[in-house]
Amino acid sequence: MSKRLKILAFWPYGDFVEFFTPAFLGRDDLDVEVVSGHGSHVQSKHPAGFARTRQLRKRLEAGEFDLVVTGNVYAVRWPEHKGFFTKLSVAARFSTIKREHLDVILVPSLLRGLPRPVPLAALDIRDAHFVRPWDWPLLKASTLYFKREMFAWKVRSLEPLMTWRRAKEIAPYEKKLRPLSYGLDPARIPASVRPMAERDIDLFISGAGNPVRDSIKERCRALTGKYRVVVSSDKVSEAEYFDLLQRSKLVVCTESAGCETWRQYEVAASGAVPLINYPYVLHHQPMESDEHAIFFSLAGQDFEKQLARALGHPSLLQDIATRARPWTIAHKARPRIADYVIEETLKEHQQQYPN
């Protein structure tokens, strides 16, 4: 049996349950020690603390860990125009009981000057298209920096850093950037799916609070006399949602805060075909038009044209659905996203330190 990879993982207060847990924890091949990870509304069971931080540094110096993984720094919302004492109380809260929100800031200093460098994978899974100024130390310290919603011309995602740094200082770090996907929790992948011929809904769209989605909803409603359309304005139960996925041929998955949404992978895993507006950023292992989904442009009447084309060719829909489900399971289940991060980082580290 091969040795389990020993990982030290720093994770901020968000996405620990949703992303990090299914991606990295509970796996036979990984031995993961967590610092500060917890659900958004649950107190951390793994805070850093002064004594633990000192011990972690010694263990890193001893070469105990094969890899360090960290989330990026969350922006702390300081209360503007609320007075000195209010700001002081917030500072005290984040320095004591809420300190775990900021523990990822410790990572660069913990890894600095080690006798044997330890590879560091920094994961920025936020929807923002940019690397924020507060993540500059992580970008510099990382072996690779994995970013969701990153522009195809990668340096554009580094532009906010240029407010504080010169462009030529930032340019060398562009090569560290790698595209990332949020992926799908394996627990949300159904064991079996309904064949396309047995689905009684042509088009399904749900969700709210997004101007792009709301616009497409109105266009879907205008098609109710032509196709069998379900437009959900209210939040449906999870059981009803998954039932609608199993009954639908096409499910609209518009961009939200970012181009990639978890919905498009749930749709594909449920045997339906995602109907997605063209993304404008890089993603790891992206869905391809007519291979894993149907893509449409937001310009003109392309949405209606692509919908008519898809529903006019049932064999095309079945072929896409047949390919997309196993592809999603193979490449988009969150443990596979973690595998990609680990493999790319260790490979890059080996190239930098061949001995």
Image (cartoon, helix red, strand yellow):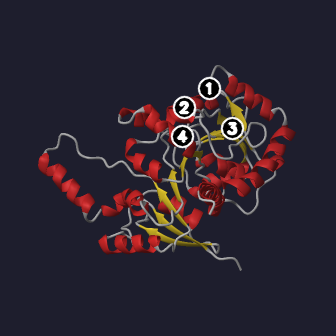
Q: Callout 4: 10 Å neighbours few (<14), some, many (20+)?
A: some
Residue 298's disc number = 1
- The residue that mark 4 highlights is 174
Q: Quadrant of the N terminus?
A: bottom right
User: Alpha carbon of mark 1 to alpha carbon of mark 3: how far?
Assistant: 12 Å
- 3 or 4: mark nearer the eye: 4
Residue shown at 51%/72% (left/top)?
Answer: 63
Which residue is drawn at the image coordinates 13% and 47% (left, top)?
Answer: 84
> How many angstroms separate mark 2 from mark 3 (CA)?
13 Å
Secondary structure beneath disc 1? loop
The 10 Å Cα crowd at callout 1, few under 14, some 14 to 19, many 20 or more, is some
Local SS, label 4: helix
Q: Foreground: 280 or 193?
A: 280
Which is nearer the N-term, disc 2 or disc 3? 2
Residue pushed farthest right? Answer: 315
Q: Position of residue 67 (x, y in %)?
A: 54, 65
- Element class at badge 2: helix
Disc sitting over residue 275 in the figure: 3
Amino acid type of the residue tagged 1 in the rendering: Leu
Q: Amino acid at mark 3?
A: Leu
Task: Kindly indicate whether the residue at mark 1 contacts the one at mark 2 (C-beta within 8 angstroms).
Answer: yes
Residue 295 vertical placement versus 110 (above, below): above
* Left/right of residue 53 with respect to residue 333 in the rendered view: left
Q: Quick check: can you spot residue 351?
A: yes
Question: Mark 2 = which residue?
Answer: 212
